[in-house]
Image (cartoon, helix red, strand yellow):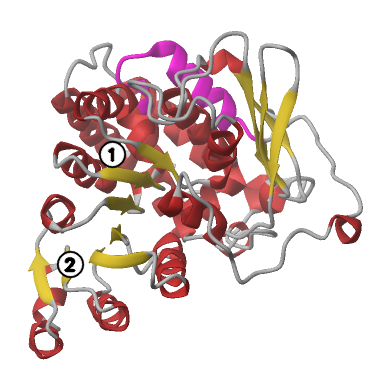
Amino acid sequence: MKRIAILGSTGSIGTNAADVIRTHPDDFRAAALAVARNARAGLEQAVSLRCPLLAVADPAAADGIRADAARAGVEIVSGPGAAAEVAARAEADMVLVSLVGLSGLRPALAAIEAGRDVALATKEVLVAAGEYVMARAAAKGVRIIPVDSEHSAVFQCIQERAGAPGFPCGALPAPASVTLTASGGPFLDSPADLSKVTPRMALDHPRWKMGPKVTVDSATMMNKGFEMLEARWLFDIPLERIGVVVHPESTVHSLVTFEDGSTMAQLAPPDMRIPIQYAFSWPERLPAERAALDLPAIGALTFRKPDETRFPCLSLVRAAAAAGGTAAAALSAADEIAVERFLAGEIAFTDIPRLVEKAMNAAASPSCSSLEDILETDARARAFASAALR
């Protein structure tokens, strides 16, 4: 029986994780849940999963459910540091981090310092602080298992190297390379003028059901850029050996080309419960009550080179990687604010990469020797992106 703490339990990843636990009650148990403000839904989850501990970041929202939680036998921890507290405190074997943006960093580090394996769904943790986080995981002997479908695919392709010392996912030796697949989002071919894109259009993803931040990042392809940075740290591979191809069918989730020239791919339906369940059960596989791929019905698999003129965020990611220091932390923070401003109607869709680039250039520091460097850059980039005019 593996005990799982789910941080971000009411989000898209969290609800799928809860479904995996319900499907396999003999294999997994919910040890703790964490939510930001949706306290009532979190409590309902805790009751249905028989989970004894719930963290709520918003104290007022937590106060609104304390009486009901007490009657249900659920302990409430509240405040901005509640998720990190339960990550360290909960009687868990693994902590799933699926919080929004850099809010997942401190909880992920708390889980690592407590010696708990981390199932990581929050890209920004490694985008902003990959070197620091992986060093702490190596020092503590903690495994970081990817939950993103693309990184899970790579992980599944390199099982003979999984668990290598210092790199829990397995380091890839030169000249092996990784190719991440991208659906292309809702604007792969149209509309021609992306400046007219509305939030409603950007949130209409053709393949995946995700939270608003990740969905908009998929539409700009910033999400794929983040995944490149994440793969760099998970698999100890230089960014120049990580490529991206557009694959609208979302059937092949990633490919690994090995040193002998052979390429291995992982295929699965676009269902996040598959990589979540694998992260929980690794190194074993468990049965699933869902349909497998029907390749004749799919018919054909297509691959295209991404258009970085229409989607400049991929170039921004490479620029951040080349700059080093805290450039990636500034990129991540500025993108979070830019997406919020786009969804609020304050800036245009095409303003997102422009604003991110300006904030990254203004806020990044050449030094990245401590967690404080990362957090200070994050704050500077957020302030710049919040204040910048359209």
Q: Is residue 71 visible?
A: yes
178 and 342: which is toward the camera: 178
Which of label 1 and label 2 is nearer to you? 2
Q: Which residue is mark 2?
A: 56
Majority secondary structure in the magenta region: helix
> x, y (%) of residue 386?
31, 43
Task: Please state which amino acid type lies under the numbered disc 2.
Answer: Val
Label 2 Cα crowd, 10 Å radius (few <14 / some 14-19 / many 20+): many
Precedes in sequence: disc 1 or disc 2: 2
Q: Position of residue 369 (x, y in %)?
A: 19, 15
Disc 1 residue crowd, few under 14, some 14–19, many 20+, Cα 10 Å: many
> Circle 2 sits in a helix, a strand or a loop, which is it?
strand
Q: Which residue is pictured at 57% across the width and 37% down the height?
A: 224
Q: Cα distance, mark 1 to mark 2?
A: 24 Å
Q: Is residue 194 magenta?
A: no
Decide: is 383 above or below 214. Answer: above
Q: Which region of the structure is painted magenta?
A: 311-328
From the viewer's side, name the closer residue of 103 and 112.
112
> Can residue 389 be spotted in the picture?
no
Say what secondary structure mark 1 lies in.
helix
Question: How far across and how far down the image is residue 74, in percent?
Answer: 14, 78
Q: Is residue 120 left or right of residue 31?
A: right
Q: Between 293 and 61, which is closer to the camera in this rendering? A: 293
Which quadrant, please, contains the N terminus? Answer: bottom left
Rendered image: mark on residue 382: 1
Identify whether 63 is placed above or below 112: below
Q: The disc labelled 1 sits on which kind of residue?
A: Arg
